[in-house]
Amino acid sequence: MSDKHAKYKSKYTADRMIPGAFEGETITRRRFMTGSAHTAGAIAAGAFTLPALGFALGPVFKSTPHRWETVGTVNQFPDNNYIPVVMTLTPGIGEAGKTTVYVRKFNAVLDTDRYDRDTPFIAISSRCAHLGCPVRWVDAAERFICPCHGGVYDLLGRRVGGPPVRPLDRFYTRVAGEDVQVGPRFSVNSELRRFSPRDPGEPLDGIGQYLYPSRPSEQKL
Amino acid sequence: MPKLPRPPAPPMPSALRAPTPRPGEGNGKGGPIDGAKEAGITVVDWVDERTSLSSAGRWLLFRKVPKGTNWFYTLGSATMFAFLSQAVTGVFLAMYYRPDPGGGAYESIRHVTNEVFLGQFVRGMHKWGSTVMVILVFLHMGRTFFFGAYKYPRELNWVIGVVLLILTLVMSFTGYLLPFDQRAYWATIVGVNINGTGPLLGPYLSDFLRGGGEFGATTLSRFYAIHMLLVPGLLVALIGAHLYLVAKLGTTAPPWRKAELRDELREAEA
């Protein structure tokens, strides 16, 4: 006796001629029980899937604290050539957490860019801006050269050949007493303007900085 | 169709013939072989009566196959056997492997390769088997494409197959890091950074893979969990769905075979 297809549908089950309807009832008990069983099931499933999902995605949004590491003394570094030093990016995992950084003293002739004027030391990351292989400083050629896909960078870390999309990353530096300390990483675009660190392969010129946004895991300075 | 009587079997030479049972010999209990046979049949019947598995088995195995089916049709099963080989060798390798980035991972692989009995062999099976599986997946995909076997009603099976292809490549990528030598480390750095070059979501994806902004303490265990828990489960489920659809829809005839008219239709045509 369902009036499912009738144009006018009463909200009362009794009016809809449903057997066993109570006076003033607007939803059948069967429907109510089905709905509450489904709701309980959804709550139970959500109770374990949502925390697990959050746990898995958590590191994407967690920022890591800045670390400063002493890499040498002030007189150790010349102002016209790089000295490679090894510093720890991720403590506790041995060799896998270390990286090579090329350090030299600030040189007023070379480092004419206005962003570099207040930097006592220039620290250039050995992480290639193409896909992250380790570049090495070739003294005779005055170039950083990447062994993987042939990226070449000049003395300031600007790309002069190969596939990289931006200059080599740099690190903040500071002097504490006689010690030179290297701190957090930052990325630069082709004009050496500073950006919060990006992964390799992500250009920063033009719309690049919007296509590859800064992530929450990178704390801003 | 009425059942025809079976013709009698040709007589065996008398030397090979079993001795005729004498009265009183064969009507007691049978020998131990007969007993074992009986027990086996009883167990199978007991399970089958409660699950009807034998009809499912017949449905899966005794299917009609079109004329012209050839060796190219075995590439799918070959891929599945490559997967089974990976699963079995992987389970036993997992008994020795330690996902410890501080040197333990490399050391455990070195131990398996150099010191465990047959360790080099089983690890070699897993390592080379992964390459074999990727090659077989592509050959199987090529067979499906060039024989037109992806067309109606098999489109969904093609889609599942593409997901299986992607998952196989995810397995290759995550498994590559586990030996944790120089090649594994730098290949993963490069691979994760390639992921990062996708616009907008890429940076988040590479953060998810590394478990942070830099290659960190949990990156290796993340890859290990994805490699041996997450993706294999998905692969098993999807291979099941893939096989179900193959059994349900049947295999396609090769494209060079013309449709054959039944004899009575051919006469009517003439």
Image: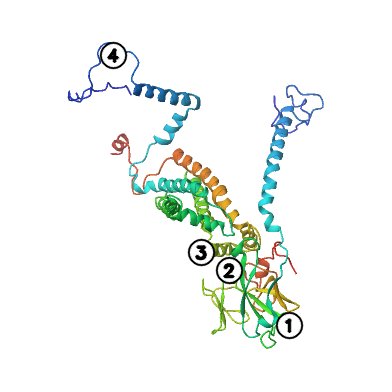
Where is residue A106? Give x, y as percent.
69, 83
Is B54 placed above or below B182 here? above
Is B178 placed above or below A202 here? above
Residue drawn 34% across and 24% down?
Answer: B33
* Pointers 4 and 2 within a single chain: no
Q: Which residue is mark 4?
A: B25
| Image marks 4 and 2: residues in contact by CB distance under 8 Å | no
Number of other residues with Cα within 10 Å of mark 1, as a class: few under 14, some 14 to 19, many 20 or more: few
Dot in front, 1 or 4: 4
Dot in front, 4 or 2: 4
Where is residue B174? Give x, y as percent.
54, 56
Q: Amino acid at mark 4?
A: Glu
Q: Is residue A171 left or right of residue B267?
A: right
**Label 1: chain?**
A
Q: Which residue is mark 1?
A: A117
**Label 4: chain?**
B
Q: Kindly identify which numbered label has been placed on residue A132.
A: 2
Give the spatial CA distance, label 4 vs label 2: 84 Å
**Label 2: chain?**
A
Q: Amino acid at mark 1?
A: Arg
Q: Kindly identify which numbered label has been placed on residue B52.
A: none
Q: Is residue B257 left or right of residue B135?
A: left
Where is residue B236? Give x, y as percent.
51, 44
Q: Visible in this render: residue B227?
A: yes
SS category of the residue bearing label 3: helix
Q: Which residue is mark 3?
A: B183
